[in-house]
Image (cartoon, helix red, strand yellow):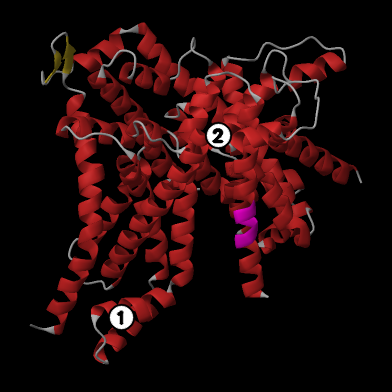
């Protein structure tokens, strides 16, 4: 056997376990779920009906459409808010903070990452509860209390908290990769700070922002924990509806069909991102 | 001067937004009362004590540690092997294999968990910590593979070939040449997987039955509403993670300096 053939065989032997693992525990389950979304739940149990009935039911049921729209609205709000909040912070840390304090400033800005994910949402429910910390302060300074517990606003605040941290990291990373000369060159050519920002910095950091925004969208639109803890049970997000179908209604085909819809949304966002990254600037 | 005030003001406001919830969480874990809401009365350590003596929480903590270590070890090993195989450049269809290995990254945890749940149901298999660990290995394998693949440069492949030329068997090449050369990547892959698995909720929630991991146990605590005990668990988990991060940071600094 030639050396090349021996190396190729070894390469296969090394790669195969990971491929088998991924196929067995990711690809096959994924197909199983897609297949299940074509089944039907009946009184006699689950039957392989192979119909698009579940998808038709989703489109025909205002509650389901509402939940998906809720998720999209929440996600878009959170993405926009997080980018707007995170960009100046990343900018200040990258440009205005003295170099020796930068690491500390960044570490402090993402410190709550190290709390548990479930606990972070719980911490916000403490802040926003009827008699919670926030209302305590508002009353202290003579303002009326806010009724934020179990509302969409609470969900948005909880999400924005997390994704502001995430985007501060990604935007900081793309800001520090900007060559400093570019800004000096822009200034030399007579651009003011606003023009420099608009024509030099923003276009060059746009890909980094876009990737961060996509991550936010992908992670936010399918999340169950934050809307469940902070949003309450009335104004459901899509993932809450999935879990509801899985649990109380025991309708796995419907849960699967809803999940496929969520996946399609993320795929759509990905295609938009890919298109944006390819667009000439 | 105005610029400085503006920057400082913005930083202060955002840091308050980012850090306050955690600060409030920790503060009210010392609440000497039944509800973790103002006014603050205390301090007391009784909620921390209640957590540390809670059998279910401690069992869940142990389960989480076992699941995190086991799933991360599997993911790191499989990712490492695959990265080595692909680094040789001898595989037909390498691009497709790479894409397939990275695919789980683009799918939400809810979908991965639901898919596994559905297929376990169809196969008639029961749920346990094993199924949780399998779910976590699926989400961590792409990360471990990507981290190891990034570290497997041509120099490593050449060194492997040289070792083989000198008569080393496959096991020795891996243990004495490749692994030491990309040890930082292996450590990073393993530790990152640990933190992801440790904190993961939805897959653990869907794929566990009687024995659960810590996030799932905390989730069931939440059903009881606001409770200083939940604050105490959260604070302790936060403290532990922060210490690990600090230790990793210090280790890195010492290495550099």
Q: Secondary structure at mark 2?
A: loop
**Residue B169 sits in which quadrant?**
bottom left
Find residue A231 and name its label: none
Residue B239 visible somewhere in the drawing: yes
Instruction: Measuring from the top left, give residue A218's x and y in whole percent.
Output: 43, 35
User: What residue sits right under mark 2 in the picture?
Assistant: B54
Find residue B173 and name its label: 1
Dot 1 and dot 2 within a common chain: yes
Residue A83 visible somewhere in the drawing: no
Q: Is residue B93 magenta?
A: no
- As rendered, which of B70 and B191 lies closer to the eye? B70
Specify the principal SS of the magenta part: helix
* Region in magenta: B243-248
Seen in the picture, residue B65 relative to B35 is either above or below; the reply is below
Which of the marked residues, 1 or 2, is nearer the chain's N terminus? Answer: 2
Seen in the picture, residue A91 relative to B58 is either above or below; the reply is below
Return the chain for callout 2: B
Viewed as shown, does residue B165 lie left or right of A116?
A: left
Viewed as shown, does residue B89 lie left or right of A66?
A: left
User: Where the C terminus of chain B falls, by quadrant?
Assistant: bottom right
Return the chain for callout 1: B
Q: Secondary structure at mark 1?
A: helix
Residue sticking out furthest to the bottom: B166
**Residue A69 sits in which quadrant?**
top left
Estimate how packed mark 1 is, as few (under 14), some (14 to 19) or many (20 or more) residues with alpha carbons within 10 Å: some
User: Are the residues tagged 1 and 2 within 8 Å (C-beta)?
Assistant: no
Instruction: Measuring from the top left, give residue A114's x and y in whole percent.
Output: 60, 45
Q: Residue at x 69, y 19 (%)?
A: B34
Viewed as shown, does residue A35 lie left or right of A100?
A: left
- As rendered, which of A189 and A259 lies closer to the eye? A259
């Amino acid at each position: 056997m030639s050396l090349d053939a021996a190396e190729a065989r070894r390469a296969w032997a090394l790669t195969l376990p990971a491929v088998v693992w991924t196929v067995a525990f990711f690809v096959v389950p994924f197909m199983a779920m897609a297949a299940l979304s074509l089944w039907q739940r009946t009184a006699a149990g689950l039957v392989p009906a192979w119909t698009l009935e579940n998808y038709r039911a989703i489109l025909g049921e205002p509650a389901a459409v509402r939940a998906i729209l809720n998720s999209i609205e929440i996600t878009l709000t959170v993405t926009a808010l997080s980018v707007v909040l995170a960009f100046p912070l990343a900018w200040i840390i990258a440009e205005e903070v003295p170099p020796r304090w930068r690491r500390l400033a960044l570490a402090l800005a993402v410190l709550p990452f190290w709390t548990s994910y479930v606990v972070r949402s719980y911490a916000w429910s403490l802040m926003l509860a009827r008699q919670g910390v926030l209302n305590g302060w508002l009353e202290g300074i003579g303002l009326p209390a806010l009724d934020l517990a179990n509302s969409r606003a609470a969900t948005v605040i909880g999400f924005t908290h997390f994704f502001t941290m995430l985007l501060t990291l990604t935007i900081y990373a793309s800001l520090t990769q900007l060559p400093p000369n570019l800004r000096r060159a822009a200034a030399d050519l007579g651009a003011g700070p606003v023009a420099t920002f608009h024509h030099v910095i923003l276009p060059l950091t746009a890909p980094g922002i876009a990737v961060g925004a996509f991550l936010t969208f992908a992670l936010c639109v399918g999340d169950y924990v934050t809307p469940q803890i902070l949003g309450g049970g009335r104004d459901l997000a899509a993932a809450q509806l999935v879990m509801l179908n899985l649990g109380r209604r025991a309708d796995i085909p419907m849960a699967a069909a809803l999940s496929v819809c969520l996946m399609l949304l993320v795929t759509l966002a990905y295609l938009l991102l890919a298109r944006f990254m390819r667009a000439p600037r | 001067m105005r610029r400085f005030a503006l920057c400082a003001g913005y930083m202060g406001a955002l840091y308050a937004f980012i850090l306050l919830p955690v600060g409030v969480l920790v503060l009210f874990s010392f609440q000497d009362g039944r509800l973790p809401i103002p006014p603050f009365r205390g301090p007391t350590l009784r909620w921390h004590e209640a957590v540390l003596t809670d059998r279910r929480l401690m069992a869940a903590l142990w389960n989480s540690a076992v699941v995190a270590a086991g799933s991360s070890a599997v993911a790191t090993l499989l990712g490492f092997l695959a990265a080595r195989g692909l680094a040789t450049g001898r595989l037909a269809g390498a691009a497709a294999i790479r894409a397939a290995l990275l695919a789980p990254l683009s799918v939400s945890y809810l979908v991965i968990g639901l898919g596994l749940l559905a297929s376990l149901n169809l196969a008639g298999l029961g749920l346990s910590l094993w199924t949780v660990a399998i779910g976590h290995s699926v989400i961590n394998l792409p990360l471990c593979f990507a981290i190891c693949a990034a570290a497997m440069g041509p120099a490593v492949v050449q060194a492997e070939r040289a070792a083989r030329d000198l008569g080393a068997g496959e096991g020795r090449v891996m243990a004495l040449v490749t692994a030491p050369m990309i040890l930082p990547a292996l450590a990073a892959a393993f530790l990152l997987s640990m933190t992801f698995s440790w904190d993961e909720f939805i897959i653990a929630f869907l794929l566990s039955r009687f024995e659960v991991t810590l996030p799932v146990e905390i989730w069931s605590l939440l059903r009881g509403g606001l409770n200083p005990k939940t604050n105490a668990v959260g604070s302790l988990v936060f403290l532990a993670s922060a210490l690990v991060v600090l230790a990793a940071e210090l280790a890195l600094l010492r290495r550099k300096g």
